[in-house]
Image (cartoon, coloured by chain):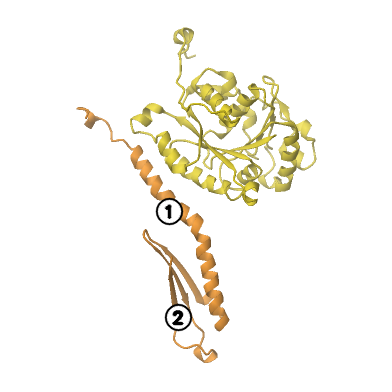
Chain colours: A yellow, B orange
Amino acid sequence: MAKVVVVTSGKGGVGKTTSTAALGAALAQAGRMVVVIDFDVGLRNLDLVMGAERRVVYDLINVIQGDARLSQALIRDKRVETLHLLPASQTRDKDALTQEGVGKVIAELREKFDYIICDSPAGIERGATHAMYHADTAVVVTNPEVSSVRDSDRIIGLLDSKTAKAEKGERIDKHLLLTRYHPGRAARGEMLKVEDVLEILSIPLLGIIPESEEVLRASNIGTPVTLSSPDSAPGRAYFDAAKRLQGETLAMMVPEEKRGLMSKLFGRRVA
Amino acid sequence: MNLFGFLRPRPTAPVARERLQILLAHERSIAGGSDLMATLKEEILGVIARHFPLEREKVQVKLDRGDAYSTLEIDIEVPSLAKTQASGGPAKLAAGG
């Protein structure tokens, strides 16, 4: 059974696109058929983070408006063959997205894929509500920082009222993905702790992604962090989160960077 | 206690946590309660409109949220008494909620 997952947050810059790419890749690396969809019309970036920016021909809006078939717009990843990208349009405006159009595309994707991961734009307007409307499950990406937590609370309220499931009186599954977490700073009382954020938002925890230079490195080279450095702390954290998303129960922990002899000798080299 | 504790800045995370808890308790009550207040307002106005003609612009609704209770204040200017059977000057209705 296909599962539609929305990656959302309200606030911008907390790691939605990074997390969409990493979770999507991790699920595909585990053999699932995955498509990641960029809903940020006009400001697409998932293609860039996935390293497919030069392969975009058609996009979601072309498919909705009947200018291209879905199979023409889907870009198959060169590294993981079960991973696919449906890019957003860079030139059209947000109004080109329609609820019925998006619904049709999602219905068609449900037939072919195990996971349909929708990368939501920031904010609570049209694009964000389109991205969440058809979702079965939501991943709420939150930083341990006041403005991000507040916006996540707002988004959780929308997930419970403005989705197809909510309109039918059903409940959408919501999971918290805490990103850019720094265990040391939290222990010193400089940053909200995992428990603080969980208590405030009261939704189950999908994973804790530690702050790491590997994340920027991955986006620099256009490769999801689970592919570029699967053994890094964020890489392992995303693999664990992907397993939980599939229903596995794993002990919750914050992976730490382990440094092998080779990386100790050469890892710090700059330029 | 760390002897050099005074050198370290005070932890700010507890402040963040407390501010969020207070703010979100407030924001959630607005998100969940505004409909109730709007319904209440419409129904009260409906009842009054059954007894004498109401001019919408002569009605003022004020909602005041406090920590312990909120007040919904509805000021209705009743049209000239000669035109209606109602007695009394401008009526004032206040509902606590």
Q: Do labels 1 and 2 share a chain?
A: yes
Q: Is residue B30 above or below residue A232?
A: below
Q: In this view, does A22 lie above or below B93?
A: above
Q: Position of residue A183 (x, y in %)?
A: 40, 27
Which residue occupies the foreground of this view, A2 or A159?
Answer: A2
Which amino acid, by three-letter code, is at mark 1? Answer: His
The residue shown at (56%, 79%) is B49
The residue tagged 2 is B91
Which amino acid, by three-letter code, is at mark 2? Answer: Ala
Q: Is mark 1 on a helix, strand or loop?
A: helix
Instruction: Give whichever of discs 1 and 2 has the lower sequence position.
Output: 1
> Taking the image as drawn, is residue B56 in sight?
no
Residue A62: numbered disc? none
Which residue occupies the foreground of this view, A79 or A108?
Answer: A108
Q: Where is residue A215 in the image (x, y as percent from the top left)?
A: 52, 25
Which residue occupies the foreground of this view, A190 or A161?
Answer: A161
Q: Distance between the residues labelled 1 and 2?
A: 31 Å
Q: How crowded is mark 1: few (under 14 residues within 10 Å), some or many (20 or more)?
A: some
